[in-house]
Image (cartoon, rainbow, N blue to C red):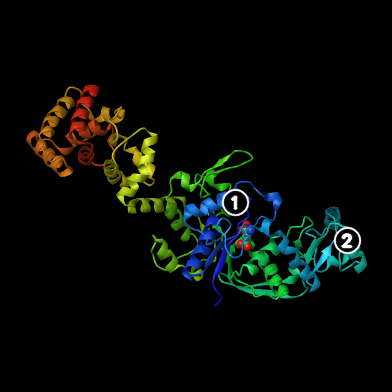
Amino acid sequence: MRKVRVRFAPSPTGPLHMGGVRTALYNYLFAKKHGGDFLLRIEDTDQTRYVPGAEEYIIEALKWCGIEPNEGVGYGGDCAPYRQSERKPMYKPYAEQLVEKGWAYYAFDTSEDLDNIRKQAELAKMPNWQYNSISRMTMKNSLTMPVDEVQAKIAAGDPYVIRFKMPRNEEVRFQDLIRGWVVFSTNELDDKVLYKSDGMPTYHLANVVDDMTMNISHVIRGEEWLPSAPLHVMLYKAFEWEAPAFAHLPLILKPDGNGKLSKRDGDRLGFPVFPLEWKDPETGAISSGYREKGYFPKAFINMLLLLGWAPGNNQEIFTEQEMIDAFTIERIGKSGSKFDPDKTRWFNQQYLRNTPLPELAQALIPLMQEKGWVKEPSYVEGVCKLMMERAVFVADMLEGHYLFQAPVEYDKDAVAKKWKPGESGALMMEWKSVLETVEDFSHDGIDAAFKGFLQTKSLGMGAVMPLFRLMLTGTLTGPSSMDVAALIGKEEVMKRIDQGVKTLG
Ligand code: GLU
């Protein structure tokens, strides 16, 4: 088998959509699995669609996701440069080689010529006019013009393009690793421009020449490129090169399954579609990103792994090594996968629960600082331990504000329901005097004292616990009061009971 070399080849026309990240991920896993190489090539031949900042965004997004190329823009390598605009001089000789071999020709038709002919075709009720194996013989090109005229035009610097001469009545077939045999008739295909009058190759020529000269063994890309594949296969044939294997990935669909998840869907439907936040350089509009929303990159990647690929058992959480070991192209589904924002949150929750406490604390500390809350790392670990069960994101653990400061207010409904003026205050002061004597101020120590207190007073849990919780947190929700009390410590508990009784009367 050929050495596995795969590439991710985005065009820098905007931020990377999560479908693009998934394509990069599948390429990456496939390369790692087979001890191959994963390249990042930037396909920027269409200068009209170039968006400043997009290339940097792509590189940063892949880094954040941990899908790092071992060759490519920003990484270097034997096939450098990896940015197509910098490879510009390479492409023309290849286009000319095809002209010499009779697989391509020069075309001098202006854009007005082409517009006119399209209009006429529409008037004649023949829309979708194509420059193809039939119409080419009525156009201005090196197949219809005398050789000396063609040469004179080129010498005079007249603008021209080079078009592929798609043969008539041939069948193009190739075996897609996901879809099986794909068959096209060349009669459905037009004579695509390979080389443009601005001296740039088109996507098709540059893509094939680069895949060839970079020794790409497998082309794993989105399904939207499937219609281009027959032309690419024909180009390999024309160049007499061995074609790479192809795998066209199915689409990622909107959550309701109605159509492709597009760049515009994300914020409209309430979730990001981009890995990182993106600020449109023209309008300044912000699109949200998974990183800024607080997702763990590994959770995001794990979610993407299963959005189109299935392991064949019910494993859902994968380490990177497990992903590499389990991944096979054969287990990529043929049909589109619905994106599920709730499942995405679930993945983040699972990762949060599996993060060791010291790491979780380190992630929480900067968020606490934004609120002006300062605590020792060991204390913050205690906070994480209490809050992590209910958290989807690290920032959710800040909901336990009472673990950082005494309550500044008391939930009104809770007070109305539970607090009996003239009675509850006295009961809390009595409980406080019991607590004061507790030596082992841990969850269990406090719990034992609490049970004793209930017994001597002949009271049920429900008569005392909500009041105690109210004193400590100002609310009736959150982790166990014993845990909260043990974490904040005896002195603080004493203060909070005093404060609560004073405030509520
Ligand atoms: N430049 C194309 C893109 O933006 C690459 C398609 C391919 O991988 O061949 O997706």
Q: Give the camera-side residue of 485 and 324.
A: 324
**Residue 107 relative to residue 25: left or right:** right
Measure the C-alpha gap from mark 2 to mark 1: 37 Å
Quick one: which residue is furthest to the left in this view?
456
Residue occupying image coordinates x 38% and y 47%: 392
Name the disc covering residue 55, or none: 1
The quadrant where residue 199 appears? bottom right
**Residue 254 seen in render:** no
> How many numbered marks appear?
2
Ligand 1 has an atom within 8 Å of the beta carbon of the residue at disc 1: no
Q: Against 363, is 142 above or below?
A: below
Give the image location of residue 218, x and y in percent.
Answer: 58, 69
Q: Give the camera-side residue of 392 and 216.
A: 216
Callout 1: 10 Å neighbours few (<14), some, many (20+)?
Answer: many
- Pointer 2 residue: 155
Q: Nearer the viewer, mark 2 or mark 1?
A: 2
At mark 2, the secondary structure is helix
**Residue 111 seen in render:** yes
**Residue 293 relative to residue 405: left or right:** right
Q: Against 181, is 305 above or below?
A: above
In which quadrant of the rendered image does the N terminus lie? bottom right
In which quadrant of the rendered image does the C terminus lie? top left
| C-beta proximity under 8 Å, tags 2 and 1 | no
Residue occupying image coordinates x 69% and y 72%: 236
Give the image location of residue 98, x and y in percent.
Answer: 77, 70
**Residue 310 relative to residue 425: left or right:** right
Closer to the chain start, of discs 2 and 1, is: 1
Mark 2 residue type = Ala
Q: In the image, ligand 1 is in what quadrant?
A: bottom right
Q: Against 352, is 232 above or below?
A: below
